[in-house]
Amino acid sequence: MGTKDDCKDAYEKQADSDKIESFTSMEELQQEMKKIKIQFEQYVDSIQSIIDSNNEYILKGDKIDPSGLSDSHAAIQNFFDNVAQNGGGVIKVPKGTYRYDFPLNYYPDKISLIAYGNVTFRSTQSLGHSIHIKAFEKLNVKEYLEQAHLHKIYGIRFSADNKNSFIFLSKGDNKGKYASAWTIERCSIVGSNCIEINNDTWLANIEKCYINPKGGYGIYMPKGGINYGEKIGILNCTFDESGIAIYNNNGEGDIKVINTSIDYGAKAVIVNGGEVTLDNVFVESNKNEHWFEIEGYGAQLNISAIQIVDKYDKGRTEELFRVHDSSDNLMGAGLTAESIRLMTTSTPSTFLVKGKGRTIINRIDTFKDANKPIVSRYLNKLAFGDCNSINSIHEWENHKISSIKPVLDFSEKYEGIASIRFSVINNDLSTGQRIQFLCKPGEMVRLKYHVKTKNLQYTQKNFNIERRFLNNKGYEISRGIIKNINTDILTWTEQLIVPSIEAPPGTHFVEINCFGENWTTETSVWLDDIVINII
């Protein structure tokens, strides 16, 4: 390596040794100066980089081939290592295609890699990882973060010949060589699985990138690593043709996706552990798949705002969202959405959400020419929809009348492990419960559930489902019984309630009450798979 000052010193020494002042003619002097200039340029070319300013290098060398015809792996890696050993800096990559047949190590604590012109790094590996992101030296966390935040990869196209490989692996050694706080900005990552996030990786950022894994993983965070996955940011990116655009199976993983488009993949997001948060995200596809899947201990998908364009037009049979509880009753899977804007190209033939996990969706809007979903799950933050845990009961409030709350019945269920049973322990008592949701003027409420009854007709009793619209202080604006059940239903039966009354002006909440008054001990009603839809 050399510096401009080094070159200047060599130039001056050469001039002194030739005793320029001794020449007898100006022509001889000019000829000798040309020779010295040529020697100077050759010296500059002989060093592998030119330092444009302090700690800035140009990727250059005899065995670094920008034509892409030969393998430049060893020369590029030596270049990276030399820069890192000399304290690090910015490596400027001239226009060209740089082929590498073996993995490269990139050091986020030492190196920025910046494209000057159209630059492609092309991997020919058939398996494994093409570029390993990890620290060059062992540092404490503060020292590492201070250095890593100074560097980034910028403006480069990364491609792979074989779609079974991964282009990037971010993984430390669990011994002080971290793989965190890196930034990949304005890059294209195409041709195979794109980025695996593993040990010692946190505070990583992917900004303004085009990610096309050709049917593979866009972002992949597996289970089983150590100290990784927190605060992974994806900002202003485009995912295209992904098998799975974003996959999180790490209980500590926390991926936040902002202002990003996920286009024409099989699945947009799978969360089997940890969290994924979507904010102002656009998703479009024509696949008959669950685009979003949440399943596993503590798995959570949080949506602030999302726009979904469903272009599958052959009769969808797979719900867009699948939320399945884990086997652990303490912390199941969940979906929380503040706002979903939905457009479909044909009449929906299935629900928006399927599964046993806890779900709450505060609002669904549709484009003017879109078809509304048949039923969307509107569940509270604990899973009462399939009535599989004690939280199914506790999340509801007591009915407004003096009543006995229902209980879980593990011997009667439509799906899952239990249902909610309404009954009384003494004659002439009442049973009931209620729950509230946000609701705006002009919106309507729909319900779907499965029901069984015993001795309603025999005892001439009723089971009522009531809807109340409330203002911002919780005062009643209007109410109405939207379903009265007074017959015996001996087998599990699905019922759908579609009232036509819109929420009146001033509405802030809607309350759903399920209750029976003055029952006998012979009377029972079971509910399961409860779905509340606010449109």
Image: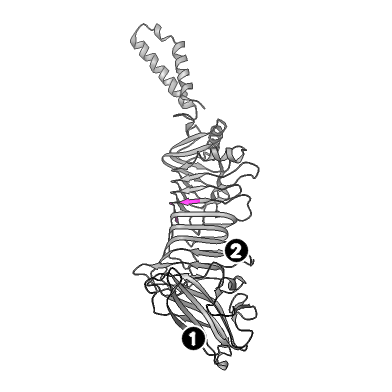
Residue 416: image location, x then y, percent: 60, 74
Between 352 and 386, the residue placed more toward the observer is: 386
Quarter of the rendering containing residue 251: bottom right
Q: Residue at x 63, y 67 (%)?
A: 329
Residue 7: image location, x then y, percent: 46, 21
Between 22 and 500, the residue placed more toward the observer is: 500
Between 65 and 258, the residue placed more toward the observer is: 258
| Main secondary structure type of the part rendered in magenta | strand
Whether residue 310 is visible, yes or no, is: no
The local crowd at label 2, few if under 14, some if 14 to 19, many if 20 or more residues have their Cα within 10 Å, is many
For residue 101, above or below residue 430? above
Q: Quadrant of the C terminus?
A: bottom left
Q: Residue at x 62, y 72 (%)?
A: 390
Residue 393: image location, x then y, percent: 59, 73
Between 218 and 135, the residue placed more toward the observer is: 135
Q: How many marks?
A: 2
Q: Residue at x 36, y 67 (%)?
A: 367
Residue type, mark 2 in image? Gly
Tell me the mark number nearer the camera, choosing from 1 and 2.
1
Q: Which residue is mark 2?
A: 296
Residue 376: image location, x then y, percent: 47, 72
For residue 506, above or below residue 406? above
Q: Which residue is mark 1?
A: 484
For residue 472, above or below residue 433? above
**Magenta stretch holds residue 237:** yes
Residue type, mark 1 in image? Asn
Whether residue 298 is visible, yes or no, is: yes
Write down the region rendered in magenta. Answer: 233-239
Using the numbered discs, state the Cα–Cα distance from disc 1 to disc 2 in whole angstroms: 38 Å
